[in-house]
Image (cartoon, rainbow, N blue to C red):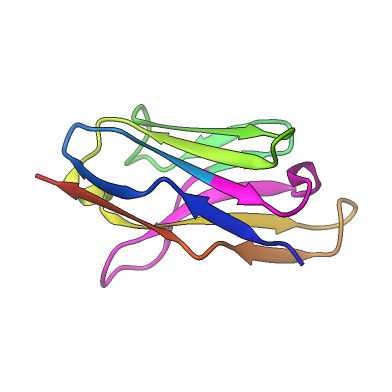
């Protein structure tokens, strides 16, 4: 069973920074794609950033230039460095992992989420 545990959320003023971390219970190299999603009150969950097994990243337009996603295969962790935070970044942030053959049995896994609140 794959478990993902996020940490690093909190309350920050606009313009500040936070670094989210997601610890996986398995070797993250077995995951085809890992990502960070967020969900604000009354809105749908949206992709913030994703990273492939080989380290290729993609970002939502709203966070490009401000957020940076990275992975540490040795620690089985992924990170989201968030700079120049804005009030509209306020949301619950979720870690996600997707696995498919030949890496392993197909599946999508989610963390429990961590709250990020940006005050104006």
What segment carries the magenta color?
Answer: 22-49
Residue 47 percent location from the top left of the image: 46, 53
Determine the residue located farthest toward the bottom in the rendered image: 42
Q: Is residue 101 magenta?
A: no
Q: Is residue 1 left or right of residue 13?
A: right
46 versus 42 height, above or below: above
Name the residue located 37 percent from the left edge and 39 percent from the top edge: 61
74 versus 39 height, above or below: above
Question: Quarter of the image containing the C terminus?
Answer: top left
90 versus 73 height, above or below: below
Name the residue located 41 percent from the left edge and 45 percent from the top edge: 8
Determine the residue located farthest toward the left in the rendered image: 120
Q: Is residue 47 magenta?
A: yes
Residue 34 percent location from the top left of the image: 63, 48
Total tally of numbered discs in the picture: 0
Name the residue located 51 percent from the left edge and 53 percent from the top edge: 6
Name the residue located 73 percent from the left edge and 31 percent from the top edge: 54
The residue nearer to you, when weighing 24 against 29, is 24
> For residue 95, what is the image quadrant?
bottom right
21 versus 41 height, above or below: above
Q: Is residue 72 left or right of residue 81?
A: right
Question: Quarter of the image containing the N terminus?
Answer: bottom right
Determine the residue located farthest toward the right in the rendered image: 102
Residue 118 percent location from the top left of the image: 20, 47
């Amino acid at each position: 069973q794959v478990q993902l545990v996020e940490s690093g959320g909190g309350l920050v003023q606009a313009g500040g920074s936070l670094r989210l971390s997601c610890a996986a219970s398995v070797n993250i190299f077995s995951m085809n794609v890992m990502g960070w999603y967020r969900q604000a009150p009354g809105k749908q969950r949206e992709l913030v950033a994703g990273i492939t097994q080989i380290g290729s990243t993609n970002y939502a337009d709203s966070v490009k230039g401000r957020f940076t996603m990275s992975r540490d295969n040795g620690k089985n962790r992924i990170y989201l460095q968030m700079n120049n935070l804005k009030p509209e970044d306020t949301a619950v942030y979720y870690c996600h992992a997707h696995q498919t053959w030949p890496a392993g049995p197909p599946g999508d896994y989610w963390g429990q989420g961590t709250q990020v609140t940006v005050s104006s």
